[in-house]
Image (spheres, grey):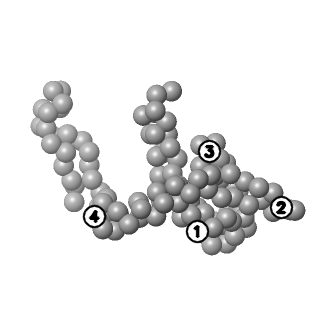
């Protein structure tokens, strides 16, 4: 698989809001599922589903200690990515909460036209 497809898969994986919340918490420290469900106020099955997706992309790894399974980021650079992304969002006002319509107006067959915002 070409690297650009891997990058797109990675960004789709971390781009889901609940997964992003999980990653922000794991950027701070290792956590068990119970802690994540408590802090995020979500069902354990939902958190486990998202952790499984993050594991499949090698973004998080787990370790078992007695009855608890703890999750952490596979690399410290992922924590920096999450932290830097949030800082960029705030500083540059990226994707502020407005709906943007990415349809082209104008000559649709030629690929010409402009992207317009519906707000």
Q: Which residue is mark 1?
A: 28
Find the distance from the CA under tag 4 to the CA under tag 1.
23 Å
* SS class, disc 3: loop
Residue 74 screen position, x and y as percent: 62, 52
* SS class, disc 1: helix
Find the distance from the CA under tag 2 to the CA under tag 4.
42 Å
Find the distance from the CA under tag 2 to the CA under tag 1.
19 Å
Q: Which residue is mark 4?
A: 92
* SS class, disc 4: helix
Assess disc 4: are there few (<14), some (14-19) or many (≥20) residues with their C-alpha within 10 Å of its C-alpha.
few
Q: Closer to the camera, 73 or 118?
A: 73
Residue displayed at 68% across by 51% down: 61
Dot 2 or dot 3, earlier in sequence = 3
Dot 3 or dot 4, earlier in sequence = 3
Dot 2 or dot 4, earlier in sequence = 2
Report whether 20 appears left or right of 73.
Answer: left
Q: Residue 58's mark?
A: 3
Find the distance from the CA under tag 3 to the CA under tag 1.
18 Å
Dot 3 or dot 1, earlier in sequence = 1
Q: Residue 65's mark?
A: 2
Residue 76 screen position, x and y as percent: 56, 57
């Amino acid at each position: 698989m070409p690297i650009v497809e891997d990058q797109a898969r990675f960004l789709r994986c971390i781009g889901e809001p609940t997964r992003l919340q999980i990653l922000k918490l794991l950027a701070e420290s290792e956590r068990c599922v119970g802690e994540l469900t408590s802090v995020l106020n979500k069902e354990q099955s939902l958190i486990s589903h998202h952790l499984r997706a993050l594991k499949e992309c090698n973004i998080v790894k787990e370790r078992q200690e007695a009855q608890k399974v703890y999750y952490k980021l596979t690399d410290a650079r992922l924590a920096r990515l999450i932290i830097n992304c949030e800082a960029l969002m705030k500083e540059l006002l990226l994707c502020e909460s407005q709906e943007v319509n990415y349809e082209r107006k104008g000559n649709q067959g030629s690929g010409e036209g402009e992207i317009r915002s519906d707000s």
